[in-house]
Image (cartoon, rainbow, N blue to C red):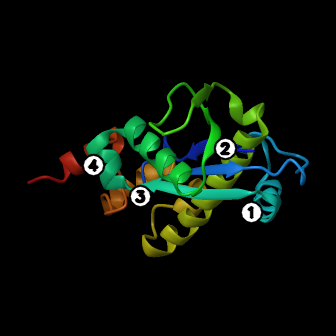
Amino acid sequence: MESCAGVDEAGCGCLAGAVIAAAVVLDPKRPIAGLADSKKLTVRQREDLDYEIRRKALAWSIGRAEPSEIDRLNILQASLLAMQRAVLGLGQTLELVRVDGRHVPELPWPVEACVGGDGRIGEISAASIVAKVARDREMGLLDSFIPGYGIAAHKGYPTPIHRQGLSRQGASRWHRRSYKPVAEVLASNRP
């Protein structure tokens, strides 16, 4: 029997870093208790579930779109590209792909948009968790490359601390130049 994949992304509203999507095909013979929208779980719960998903799923994959792609395409198109990359990275034929949200990537299989799917559909919940954990880990690493923005704490979101870092240090190469707070800083630093 062919399988169903769930897809979700993390990081759309961030000022820095890639948008990261995950695709997961769960194994009905190896259920995972506690799957939920990643935003409703604690860091520890997400970490534990991420480990279990990666161990028990039939397949999982991560796709990404870099800040330069986000700036060139816009965040919606870049998110769809990251989702497409994640699904194709599964390397298998799928019966159905369920995507959290209203918009779906172009794929060679049937695709269903599922608003609020990350809280209702196991495959999408699993993808939500894998994407969020992967992105949060990456933001922790990014913070060590570009200190002064507080990225390890806020994960790239436009918090007051992040905006203060932008004002003080300007934008790094990992910032999304098309996002208004970053564009304003870049404009104010022009001679």
Disc 3, SS: helix
- Rate crowding at label 4 as few (under 14), some (14 to 19) or many (20 or more) other CA atoms within 10 Å: some
Cα separation, mark 1 vs mark 2, equals 14 Å
Name which residue type carries label 4: Val
Could you tell me residue 172's position as x and y percent?
33, 63
Which residue occupies the foreground of this view, 122 or 172? 122
Residue 158 visible in the picture: no
Report whether 94 appears left or right of 122.
left
Can you give x and y, in whole percent of width and height, for residue 49 in the image?
Answer: 81, 56
Residue hosting label 2: 5
Residue 54's disc number: 1
Give the spatial CA distance, label 3 vs label 4: 10 Å
User: Which residue occupies the foreground of this view, 108 or 21?
Assistant: 108
Q: Residues within 10 Å of mark 2 (few under 14, many from 20)?
A: many
Mark 1 / mark 3, whichever is N-terminal: 1
> How much space separates mark 4 and mark 1, taking CA atoms?
40 Å
Q: Which residue is mark 3?
A: 165
Query: Does label 4 or label 1 sit earlier along the sequence?
Result: 1
